[in-house]
Image (tube, rainbow, N blue to C red):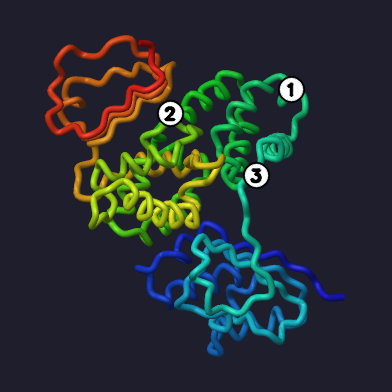
């Protein structure tokens, strides 16, 4: 009877890094496979890929590559078509990397709806009593994770270890922040989500990058009227409009929106409205506008957090968003000569 192996090459870090030489990527994968098969000492003069191919030829195995580099082929690591009983899953953040790669089936992983997200969370926690006792906190935490299975799994795994209510409460406070600290990014397992965002962002022209960063000024899960968003883009001169009319801006804005939606940086939610996925918005808020310093956009969208800016922040600000922040007053005469946008919607009058 053939033995079965599950080989998961996750967290190598080399698979999607174009700065790493192909040979280094291949070597890292080969060593991981040989280690899994307990064949580290058997590579010999014939080469690692030959040893791997012989070992797997008659075995049933599942090889999972978390990421992929277009500079290598499976044959380079000893995986051949004649391995009749083997299966390979390639998890690619950028589907264009696989456009010249033969595969049996392509599956696009969608974000989970709220109910399924909570089911996955509870399954990872694996403690019915704990989930029931913290059901409100669990719902709030799941909501902040944007329906991404890997992120939900990572955070739930930490909460399973740290069962204290105080830890869960601290987690939701950190998750609710508009910008996450680096420790939380690592804790939430967001390396894949950040790579996906960076890959999509890199495909955009400079002005289109400004358009998506501008959309992040709106609060999370805020439904943005498309006409208003396009009008703001036009006012900021992000759109290419040889004829400076709103009708021409709408045509150009529609093209930009189509690209941003196709790249999953924005999503249609109602007729004539879009919103930004929670995780993408947070990553966008950490990204400086092209040609500007890091701290030129300031967003305060949580009414539970003090929305007032410091004097030095007003002075540096190009864009300030205080939407739905419950502010009742602003500084009398802040120094903000360079500001182009100030959002104050949905605050007390």
The C terminus: image quadrant = top left
Q: Which mark is residue 112?
A: 3
User: Does residue 291 appear in the picture of this structure?
Assistant: yes
Residue marked by disc 2: 177
Q: How far is mark 3 from mark 2, CA to CA?
A: 22 Å
Query: Along the line of sight, which residue is nearer the eye, 254 or 130?
Result: 254
Q: Is residue 63 left or right of residue 290?
A: right
In this orientation, which residue lies closer to the viewer: 60 or 195? 195
Q: Residues within 10 Å of mark 1 (few under 14, many from 20)?
A: few
- Asked if one can make out residue 37 in the rendered structure from this viewpoint, the answer is no
Q: CA distance from mark 1 to mark 2?
A: 25 Å
Q: Which residue is mark 1?
A: 132
Dot 3 or dot 2, earlier in sequence: 3
Real-space Cα separation, disc 3 to disc 1, in angstroms? 21 Å
Residue 28: assigned label = none
Mark 1 in CB contact with mark 2 (< 8 angstroms): no
Residue furthest to the bottom: 46
| In the rendered image, the vertical position of residue 106 relative to residue 150, given as above or below | below
**Foreground tag (1 vs 2):** 2
């Amino acid at each position: 009877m053939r033995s079965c192996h599950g080989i998961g090459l996750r967290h190598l870090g080399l698979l999607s890094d174009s700065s790493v030489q192909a040979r280094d990527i291949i070597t890292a994968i080969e060593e991981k496979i040989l280690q899994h098969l307990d064949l580290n000492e058997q590579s010999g003069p014939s080469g690692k890929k030959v040893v791997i191919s012989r070992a797997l030829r008659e075995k049933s195995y599942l090889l999972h590559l978390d990421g992929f580099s277009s500079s290598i082929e499976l044959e380079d690591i000893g995986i051949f078509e004649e391995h009749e009983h083997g299966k390979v899953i390639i998890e690619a953040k950028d589907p264009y990397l696989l456009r010249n790669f033969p595969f049996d089936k392509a599956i696009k992983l969608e974000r989970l709806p709220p109910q399924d997200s909570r089911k996955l969370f509870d399954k990872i926690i694996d403690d019915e009593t704990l989930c029931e006792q913290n059901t409100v906190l669990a719902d709030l935490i799941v909501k902040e994770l944007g329906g991404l299975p890997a992120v939900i799994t990572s955070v739930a795994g930490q909460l399973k270890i740290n069962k204290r209510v105080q830890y869960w409460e601290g987690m939701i406070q950190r998750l609710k922040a508009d910008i996450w600290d680096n420790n939380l990014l690592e804790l939430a397992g967001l390396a894949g989500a950040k790579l996906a965002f960076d890959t999509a962002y890199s495909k955009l022209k400079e002005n289109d990058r400004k358009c998506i960063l501008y959309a992040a000024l709106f609060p999370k899960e805020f439904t943005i009227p498309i006409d208003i968003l396009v009008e703001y883009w036009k006012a900021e001169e992000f759109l290419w409009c040889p004829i400076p009319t709103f009708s021409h801006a709408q045509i150009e804005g529609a093209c930009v929106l189509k690209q941003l939606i196709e790249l999953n940086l924005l999503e249609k939610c109602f007729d004539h409205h879009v919103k930004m996925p929670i995780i993408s918005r947070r990553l966008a808020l950490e990204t400086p506008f092209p040609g500007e310093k890091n701290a030129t956009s300031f967003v305060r969208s949580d009414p539970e957090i003090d929305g007032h800016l410091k004097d030095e922040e007003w002075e540096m600000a190009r864009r300030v968003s205080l939407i739905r922040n419950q502010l009742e007053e602003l500084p009398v005469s802040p120094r903000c000569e360079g500001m182009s946008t100030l959002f104050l919607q949905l605050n007390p009058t």
